[in-house]
Amino acid sequence: MPSKYFEIAGHAVNVLHPPPSTLPGVAPAPALGKRLVLLHGAGSTAAIWSRQLEHFALRHSPIAFDWPGHGRSSGTEALPSIAAYADCTLALLDQLGVERSVVVGTSMGGLVALEIALRAAARVEALVLVSTAARVVLPAEMTATWHGVMTGRAPQPFTPFGYGDDPPRELLREGWALQVQTDPRVRYFDLMLAQQVDFRPRLGEIRLPALVVHGAKDPIIPAADGAALARDLAGAAHVEIPGAGHYLYREKPEALHAAIDPFLERLPR
């Protein structure tokens, strides 16, 4: 996918989009269907969405980007709050001329999507919330591991933790290669701030079309928390993918696409 940089609050933010490429600083024009904005998770990068960018570009106009401090965007620190990530996202959409979009967020990106929906509902056509919850409580072992990595007391974990049934070795290697593209300090502080918000009391304020997709064997954010999110969002559709863990975009892309495609088709033209 072509990429280009846009300056947001002093950061060079890397944006991925479908072809054709455009001149530097020129926003990619929407060519098809719905505008989709794909938000990555804690300590992650836009590159996790490579399969989704390719798939949805056939009928829609998706973009994905690295938040500051992540992947190929500038910066060495996490942003200070979920609200700050929402600010950054809205500022980027302003620069790109995206007035309204379907916001697709995974894990921490789903929290940012909820923040945007509460703060700027007019900018959101619909929500797709993947592997997320209204209140995230992460496994203590996971946060302890990344604290050790951040402080130089432990190596990065190259394990299958977070995946569902029998992930292929090449899939794990792909995830590990993406893992090392963001500083462990950024990942750790992302994990901390993701646990500082609780959207449960405010979900009733969101009156937007919504789809919640979760892996049945997600060990990071339990499937029951995804089901609760779908239940408490008015009229939200809910899809649980058997055998899948936390990384649906990589583990079960076909099943994820099969859940999202009909949801997008049901949205008003």
Image: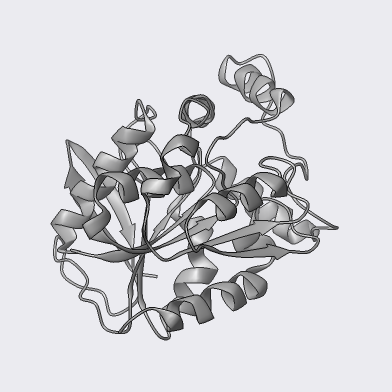
Quarter of the view holding residue 115: top left
Measured as percent of width and height from the top left, residue 76 is found at 37, 29
Rendered view: 4 above or below 33 = above
Measured as percent of width and height from the top left, residue 204 is found at 42, 47
Query: In the picture, which quadrant includes the N terminus?
Result: bottom left
Measured as percent of width and height from the top left, residue 154 is found at 69, 20
Depth order, front residue of 25/97: 97
Rendered view: 219 above or below 24 = above
Measured as percent of width and height from the top left, residue 244 is found at 75, 59
Depth order, front residue of 104/21: 104
Residue that lies at the very extreme toward the right in this rendered image: 166
In percent of the image, x 79 and y 54: which residue is there? 164
In percent of the image, x 19 and y 47: which residue is there? 91
Depth order, front residue of 85/137: 137
Quarter of the view holding residue 31: bottom left
Depth order, front residue of 133/8: 133
Rendered view: 185 above or below 258 = above
Query: In the picture, which quadrant includes the C terminus?
Result: bottom left
